[in-house]
Image (cartoon, rainbow, N blue to C red):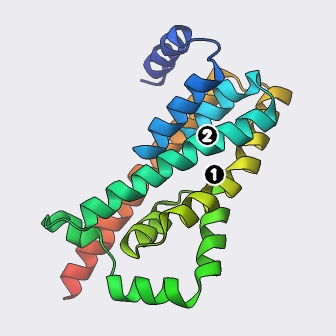
Amino acid sequence: MPGLILSFWSDLVRMAPPELPLPVLCLLLFVDNSTFAALTTPLLLAYAPHFEPWKVGLFGALAAGAGSTVQIMLFRWILGSNWGWAKRLAPSRDRVEKVLTQSPSASFIAILLARATPLPDGPIKLVVAAGRYPLPRYFLAVLLGGIPYFALLAWLGHEFPIPPWALLALVVVIGLVFVIERWRKLGRKESAQRTS
């Protein structure tokens, strides 16, 4: 099975263009961040080394920040719907709004730091969406956090070229983290139901 996956990945890498124009990379970052936001780091490691780090930092962070802001608007729309599954995702609006009102600067810093690292920021995005955090302030936080992170990844990729197998490993790790987290949450939910 691992040989089959590596063979598939090898074929996929051969089909991928070796270089992309910066606007196309920015478009991919926008689309990724407005949907699942799972491939930003692999995209940057694969294509950002072809550009000056400051360009990737600035323009990539602008595109990803705009996409992330669109994602927050989608989260708000979903959380505001009458769908039962969406209500289970939503934290208590009163509690979230109270926390955001009491410490808006701490919220801004948390968003900025989440963007400036490769750590998943899904929980923060749910709080931002449910708490009606101001979109311009959210965009500014992800932009300011994204500029150094994106520029650093572009520089690292330029100085230390990443082989395709390492990018595959990164994508697999991201997928495994997602699956394990889902599995862990389901386990918690089942144990809570048994104790009730």
Residue type pointed to by label 1: Pro
- The residue nearer to you, when weighing 167 against 132, is 132
Which residue is identified by label 2? 41
Which quadrant would residue 45 be assigned to in this image? Answer: top right
Q: CA distance from mark 2 to mark 1?
A: 7 Å
Residue 172: x and y in percent read 50, 37
Residue density around tag 1, few if under 14, some if 14–19, many if 20 or more, within 10 Å = few
Which residue is identified by label 1? 118
When the figure is inspected, residue 185 is found, relative to residue 30, above or below; the finding is below
Tell me what residue is drawn at x 45 percent, y 43 percent: 175
Residue 195: x and y in percent read 22, 87
- The residue nearer to you, when weighing 36 against 22, is 22
Which quadrant would residue 112 be assigned to in this image? Answer: bottom right
Residue 147: x and y in percent read 72, 48
Regarding residue 96, the answer to whether it shows in the image is yes
Tell me what residue is drawn at x 43 percent, y 45 percent: 34
Q: Relative to residue 148, is residue 17 drawn left or right?
A: left
Q: Residue furthest right?
A: 159
Q: How many marks?
A: 2
Q: Quadrant of the N terminus?
A: top left
Q: Residue furthest front?
A: 136
Q: Which SS class for mark 2?
A: helix
Q: Which SS class for mark 1?
A: loop
Contact flag, marks 2 and 1 (Cβ < 8 Å): yes
Regarding residue 117, the answer to whether it shows in the image is no
Q: Quadrant of the C terminus?
A: bottom left
Q: Relative to residue 105, is residue 95 drawn left or right?
A: left
Earlier in the chain: of badge 2 and badge 1, it is 2
When the figure is inspected, residue 89 is found, relative to residue 115, above or below; the finding is below
Q: Relative to residue 189, is residue 4 drawn left or right?
A: right
Residue type pointed to by label 2: Thr
Tell me what residue is drawn at x 77 percent, y 30 percent: 157
